[in-house]
Amino acid sequence: MEQEDKNLQAQPSETQEKPEKQPLPKGYEAYLSLFDLVRMLAVITLVFVFFFRLNGVSGSSMYPTLVDKDYLVLESNFLYRDAKQGDIVVLYTPPFSENDELLVKRVIAVGGQTVDIDFNAGVVYVDGQALDEPYTFEPTYLSYAEYGKALDYPVTVPEGELFVMGDNRNHSEDSRFSDVGCVKKEAVLGKVLLVVFPGRQTNEFGAVTGGRSWHRFGAVS
């Protein structure tokens, strides 16, 4: 009998209430939400710092593909290491320091390729093959003297360098001129992926001709 009483005492009471869950301190849930938000923003920032960049367009040298005040997303040079013909890139101007103006240009040729330009016909050749360039505003005619001394053609691009030009061929300072010439791959900040905030409509000289051109929102090629 005594053993039975001891067993009964050892069993927990069915009516015994479980301890109540203590409420979180006032404001603690809001603190957790804020912490999660900060953590999420930190991750997004790190992703952009290492993998992507935001960059604005200044000028009309890439018209009509890009216009003044377009805002772009770039694949940063952390990922983008192998520039290819036709890519649109953002790069430092000589001497390639971050304090200098950035250029937005299209890669025409890479190291080891030879560029020739028939300024009378407005045709660009790479390794003897005429380029199909539907993205240009007009053919590549005689270079304008305002951009400095033109290179002597044909030009073989040194290894580790790029030959770049603007799509607005007759209003672009680029690799055709000795002030820029072929640019080193290390000068490239990244490849243009898309327009995230279009600028206003302009003409080839950069003069505003209309409202914001939202039809250009999206991927760039």
Image (cartoon, rainbow, N blue to C red):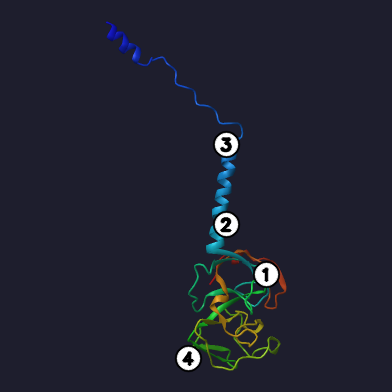
Q: Distance of mark 4 from mark 3, alpha carbons? A: 68 Å
Which residue lies under the disc numbered 1? 201
Residue 46 at x, y percent in the picture = 55, 58
- The residue lying at 48 percent from left, 91 percent from top is 128
Whichever of callouts 2 and 4 sits on the residue coming sooner in the sequence is: 2
Mark 4 is surrounded, within 10 Å at the Cα level, by few (under 14), some (14 to 19) or many (20 or more) other residues, namely few
- Label 3: state its secondary structure: helix
**Does residue 131 sit above or below 56 in this rendering?**
below
Which residue lies under the disc numbered 2? 45
Residue 211 at x, y percent in the picture = 69, 65
Q: Tell me if label 4 and label 1 are in contact, CB under 8 Å.
A: no
State whether residue 140 appears in this view: yes
Q: Distance of mark 1 from mark 3, alpha carbons? A: 48 Å
Marks counted in the figure total: 4
Which residue lies under the disc numbered 3? 29
Whichever of callouts 2 and 3 sits on the residue coming sooner in the sequence is: 3
**Image-based side of 205 in relation to 181, left or right:** right
- The residue lying at 32 percent from left, 11 percent from top is 8
- Amino acid carrying mark 1 in the image: Gln
Mark in front: 2 vs 1: 2
Which residue lies under the disc numbered 4? 128
Mark 2 is surrounded, within 10 Å at the Cα level, by few (under 14), some (14 to 19) or many (20 or more) other residues, namely few
- Amino acid carrying mark 4 in the image: Gly
**Does residue 215 sit above or below 86 in this rendering?**
above
